[in-house]
Structures are given as structure tokens and as C-alpha cells.
Image: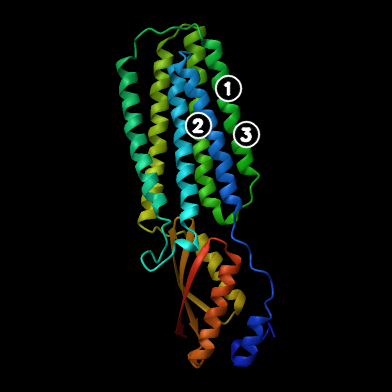
Amino acid sequence: MANNSFRDQTIDDLARFEFDDSRPAKPRETGFARICWVLFWGNLGLALFKVTVGTLGYSPLLIIDGLNSAANAVVLTTIIMSIQMSRKESINEKYPYGKGKVQYMLTLAVGVLLSIGASLIFALSMRTLYASISFEPTGTALAAALISVGGNLMLLRFLKQTDLPNHKEELKRIKNLHTLNIAASTVVIQAILLAGIFGWFVAERMGGLSISLLVLLLSIRIIKSSLDGIMDRSNGRDMDADVSDLVTEINDDLEVRWIRSRNTGQNLWLDVNVGINGDYTVRRVDRIAKRIRDHIEREMERVSHVSVHCSPL
């Protein structure tokens, strides 16, 4: 029957085709939330550790680096909140698309605050560029920076072992955050070595300038990602190709004319226009559209709603 076209099938055939698909629906992914919690506690721990060591007087660069990890923890907090607010229970008459976009507004605020903080750090580092500093606690500060690099490498390794294709873009952004953290901690290590061992105190101030620029880059990325979500940027050709493949899996006679998608936090809403034989009855077209909706929602966990628009070929 799978080899027959829809032109050779009756309504009863289509009904049997629909109800014979007895595969269990894939459960909504909870793995992504678990990953975010692990990363949150990891970043929070690193932030508290570096800020504490830096506050004790071992290196002001550690405080700046600790704020970088704290920013990661805040971003992860907004993602976790979005996961909770993107549940179907949050969809009602007042919020027909749910409340998931609160993630973008929160991360936008975080990005703006980070950019302001990075600018202040940059200005402060410039003003104190040639001020003398104490080189006594070099060993402790160096050990703390090395622990930071090691912790972020462990978190990156944890991310690489995850297999969540429906969240690959979000995971990619989180990886970029930790890569910037490693770069910032590496700058701290270099500055401490040059300042504490060789006596080049300017190196620590230059380290402050470098880290502030890294934080500014991080804030720009966060702001851009937030604006993309608020303005409903397309999910890209790869996502469209995946949806088109799922539609054609129903039957090769179907023609996908356009696909529009929008992110509402951690949920994905899809509008698909499908070309169908113009001789089909309304009831028959409705069955095909329902089959397409069910198939897409079954195969793509992030999808919370699919609208199928049918037009005659």
C-alpha cells in the first residue's frame, strides 16, 4: 500500500493508513532541561569560586572572570525558565502562543547589562593601566585560573557527549559561551604569569582590557540571539529541509510549497503549505493534513503546533 499513490486510495484506505501507525509517540524531551541544570550549577560554582578568590585579594582579574561565568549561569537560568513557561499548560486564550518568548526578553536584558559592565571594566582598566599592583598571591590566582579552565573543559566535554538534534542550535550557543570563558581564563593565566613572575604589572591591566572585550563580544552575541527570537527569525534551510522530508514521507505526490517557523522559547510553531490533487474531497484533504501534522509532531519533539495549509496542484 505504501507504494500506491493517493489517487489510487479511498478514504477507508487513508483511515487504515492513519490508524495502522502504532509507533509510540516520542516523549517530550527532558534531557535538555537536565543538561541546562548541570551547566547552571557548574557555572555558578565556578563563578562563586573565582569571585571569592579574587575578592580575597589574589587577583582582580578573577573577579571579572567570575562575572563571566555568572553571566553564563544567568543565561542558563533564562533557558530553564523558558522550558517551564513553554509547556502546553501555559497556552491559553490570553497567550495562544504560550509564554516562551520571555526567554528572549530576559536574555536581552542580560546582554544589555553585560555590555554596560564590560564597558565599565574597560574604562576602569584604562584608567589604572599603569598603576602598580601586588605580585605576592600569584600562585593562588594562577591555580584558580587553571581550575576555571579545567572546569569549563569538563563542561564542554559533557556538552559534546549529548545527542539532542532538536536543540543543536541552542547547544551550539551554549558551547560558544563556555569557549569564551576558557579564553577569558587563559587571558587571566597569561596576565598573572607576566605580572607576578616577570614583574610586568601592565600585563594584568591588559588582561582586564582583553577580558572586558571578550565579555562585550559575549553580550553582543546574547543581544543578537535575543533579537532574532523576538523578531521571529527563520530557523534556516536545514530545518525547512527536515520538515519537507517528513511531509514527503507521507507520500511522494505531495508538494511542499513553503514552510514558515517561529520559536516561542523552547517550542517551535510551524506553518506548512502543501500542494494536493485538486480533485480530492475536503474530507480526504483533511485526513491527509491531519496525517502530516501527526507525523511532524511525532518526529520533532520541539514542535508544539503545526498548521497545514492545502492548496490544489
Q: Which residue is mark 1?
A: 146
The secondary element bearing badge 2 is classed as helix
Crowdedness of circle 2 by 10 Å Cα count: few (<14), some, many (20+)? Answer: many
Point out the tag, 2 or 3, that comes first from the N-terminus: 3
Disc 3 residue type (three-letter): Met
Looking at the rendered structure, which numbered label has been put on residue 73? Answer: none
Q: CA distance from mark 3 to mark 1?
A: 12 Å
Name the residue located 60 percent from the left edge and 36 percent from the top edge. Answer: 155
Camera sees residue 245: no
- Whole-percent x and y of residue 56? 47, 14
Residue plotted at (59% across, 45% down): 35
Amino acid of disc 1: Leu
Q: Check disc 3: other Cα within 10 Å, few if <14, some if 14-19, many if 20+.
A: few
Quadrant of the rendered structure where residue 250 is? bottom right
Q: Which residue is mark 3?
A: 154
178 vs 235: above or below: above
Foreground residue, 59 or 132? Answer: 59
In the structure shown, which secondary structural element does the residue marked by tag 3 occupy? Answer: helix
Three-letter residue code for mark 2: Asn
Q: Earlier in the sequence, mark 1 or mark 2?
A: 1
Q: Residues within 10 Å of mark 1 (few under 14, many from 20)?
A: some
Instruction: Please count the marks in the image.
Output: 3
Picture layout, residue 235 above or below residue 111? below
Left or right placement of residue 102 versus residue 295 in this view? left
